Amino acid sequence: MTLIINTMNKFPLLFLLLVITTIAQSQTIRPGAIWPDNNSNHIQAHGGAIIQYHHQYYWYGETYDADTVHKSVNCYNSKDLIHWTYKGKVLTMSMPDTVLTQFKLERPKVFYNVRTRKFVLYMHLDGVAHGSDRDYSFASVGVALSNKPAGPFKFIRAFRPLGDESRDIGQFIDDDGTAYLIFEDRPSGGFHIARLSADYLDVQKEAAFIKQPMEGGAIVHYHGLYYVIGSHLTGWSPNPNQYATARSISGPWSIFKDIAPPQTNTYNSQSSFLLKIAGSKSTTVIFMADQWKPDSLWDSRYLWMPLRIGDGQLALPAPKPWAINLKTGVWK
């Protein structure tokens, strides 16, 4: 205590600035920084997405550590999008299909079905099949079900949506509550936007097929226009993510344009989800992306930034610390 008192007496302004800086940092989202949860561990929710349920946000994503790489899903919840509480592994997978010798789980997305009151988890399932030495040949989705947002989820089945290959997946829930799965189809050279069945346990009907070889698909409906974002097929390496627009989710879709200066490679990130915050004064769309570190995936970071969006234009600002008022929807 004596040391602290002496420090404050000798350097009162420096101490005050340190306190103010610490408080400010704890109230902001800092793109590209280590993001600690309530246990001071870096959040492991990669390739993920967010749903809102009972005035709380739930963030689901891939878990990366020594034991569960590509095989489990983490869940965190928050009331302010800044401070996240770890809810645990809500799904840990064993071999999902007998045709596989190796498998991986990627890009988990959770939908809440108001009618059934169930939480439905979709995931990209892939791996090496018996008699093959080619990875990513399974190209399917998996579905799991839970009664609670923080699980546990029970795996139901794996399948190819609409009979097509499926790799990176994304999710979209329209303003009228209609749920869609976005999935990349490598043989067809594009990606599908497909409506889910009433219980969300199956992919029912194709809403659009966009002939553009892209993954990391994400969609938002903003002021009468649909905006879709995706990244090019460069594996773990970042590239210039692009967007297109349409007045109907079935299209026609515009040509694709860069969301950031192409030389930045989307500030070394890859799209994962678009989160819309509709407040009393403004509606903010948050670009959620991953900054992958393939040699140390557990240390991969998150790039979250509010988009500049409207009138058919969309741009990702250069990353910097920011904050949002969730009641008004205003960010700064």
Image (tube, rainbow, N blue to C red):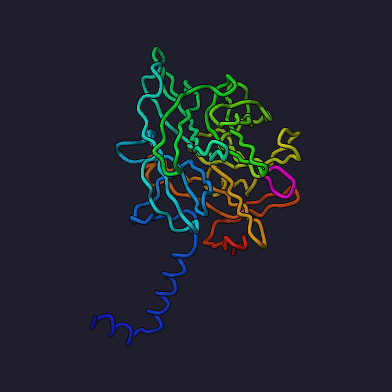
**In the rendered structure, does residue 268 fall within the stretch colored magenta?**
no
Left or right relative to 45: residue 248: right
Left or right relative to 210: residue 82: left
183 shown above or below 130: below
Quadrant housing residue 293: top left
4 shown above or below 138: below
Q: How many labels does the image show?
A: 0
Q: Is the magenta stretch mostly helix, strand or loop?
A: strand
Q: Does the image show residue 109?
A: no
Q: Does the image show residue 199?
A: yes
Pinpoint residue 227: horizontal percent, then vertical percent: 68, 43
Left or right relative to 32: residue 92: left
Pinpoint residue 82: horizontal percent, then vertical percent: 47, 58
Question: Front-most of 324 and 156?
Answer: 156
Provide the residue span drawn in magenta: 221-226
Left or right relative to 211: residue 25: left
Task: Name the residue located 36 percent from the left edge and 34 percent from the top edge.
Answer: 92
**In the rendered structure, does residue 222 fall within the stretch colored magenta?**
yes
The quadrant of the image that shows the N terminus is: bottom left
Pinpoint residue 277: horizontal percent, then vertical percent: 60, 54
Pinpoint residue 320: horizontal percent, then vertical percent: 53, 60
Task: Name the residue located 48 percent from the left edge and 49 percent from the top edge.
Answer: 302
Outermost residue toward the bottom? Answer: 9
Task: Name the residue located 53 percent from the left edge and 40 percent from the top edge.
Answer: 112
